[in-house]
Amino acid sequence: MSLPPILSAEHLSKHFAQSRRRRLPGRAPARLHAVDDVTLAIHPGEALGLVGESGCGKSTLARLLCRLLDPSAGQIYVAGREVTTMSTAAFTRSPMRSDIQMVFQDPTDSLNPRFNSFDLIADPLRQLKPPHSRAELIAKVEAAARSVNLPLDLLSRFPHQLSGGEKARVGIARAMVVTPRLLILDEPTSALDVSVQATVLQLLDKIRRDRGVALLFVSHDLNVVRLLCSRIMVMYLGQIVESGPTDALFRDPAHPYTRALLSAIPTLRGRAGGQRIRLDGEPQSPIAPDGSRCRLYGRCPAQQAFCAQAEPALTGQPGGRQVRCHFAGSAVPGQR
């Protein structure tokens, strides 16, 4: 953490305009707030987890940070240089493109079925760091394959001839072949068997330790994130509601939503922290959300009348924690 961040974002937002068919006559188009005012920093060699339920904005945030989407507001910095002044197309042609690589959720859908494994791994190299010779290309592709424990005899095979774990390794190898400083992983193990998940997670941790590559690991599986990440951010309806060191967050979650997530983790010996916390009621709409109340209001087991009158800010807490709750650390009925 003493080193400057590889990537940072300040007050990052992404809003999507609703289609004309869903717009009332004479009304301005409502906007879906997928990501709202997110500030973060990722340092060399760090593994940062981003968790939250489906639809909370995790994947949109990952695509913003990887510059696959243009933000509606805010700034993104790569090694201290702002890159939001560039379009996504201009960033793709920039030398900084190789610093940030993304591993997508489904290895089957993200791999071109017409390319064999060699060409899948070689394609980013040809686009971003063209080798001087065919021999150099082959050497770099084979080195990337070895780094993810992918047998070289599989390089001639096409995606449909590979297992799920082998396709996942190809996806990681094609990201690593351009020697990135940050890997953004959008639920890369969700489509894999549990035994294969463990192997891929061990591989990612080895890459982080051996090469100093930072990881942003996006997932809804808290157990997976706990194994890999030293720091966690919890997202709800486009906002970061809590962040902090993994051990501290699991030991003493400060936000009611984080406590509900942790209580839902299945265990063989029952729940050490008591019964599961259920968030009853309907979630608020992400379309033009009310900025005068907490976004968990209506579902929160610890809500008070004041929560419907003012939206809480993300405030710092002891131990490097941040919490978006009016009553963080207070003895409010239902919070513990």
Image (tube, rainbow, N blue to C red):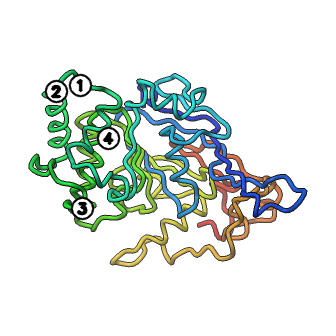
Using the image, determine if residue 110 lies above or below residue 125. below
Q: Is residue 107 above or below residue 129?
A: below
Q: Which residue is mark 3?
A: 160
Instruction: List the residue tagged with mark 2.
Output: 136
Which type of secondary structure does the marked residue at label 1 adopt?
loop
> As drawn, is 238 to the left or to the right of 160?
right
Camera-nearest label, 2 or 4: 2
Disc 2 versus disc 3: distance between alpha carbons? 27 Å
Q: Earlier in the sequence, mark 4 or mark 3?
A: 3
Is tag 2's residue or tag 3's residue first in the polypeptide sequence? 2
Image quarter hosting the C terminus: bottom right
Residue hosting label 1:
131
Residue type, numbered disc 3: His
Q: Which residue is mark 4?
A: 175
Can you name the residue that lies furthest to the front here?
A: 114
Q: Answer with mark 4 or mark 1, whichever residue precedes in sequence.
A: 1
Residue 115: x and y, percent? 26, 49
The secondary element bearing badge 4 is classed as helix
Q: Position of residue 103 (x, y in %)?
A: 37, 48
The residue nearer to you, when weighing 283 against 25, is: 25
| Tag 1: amino acid | Pro
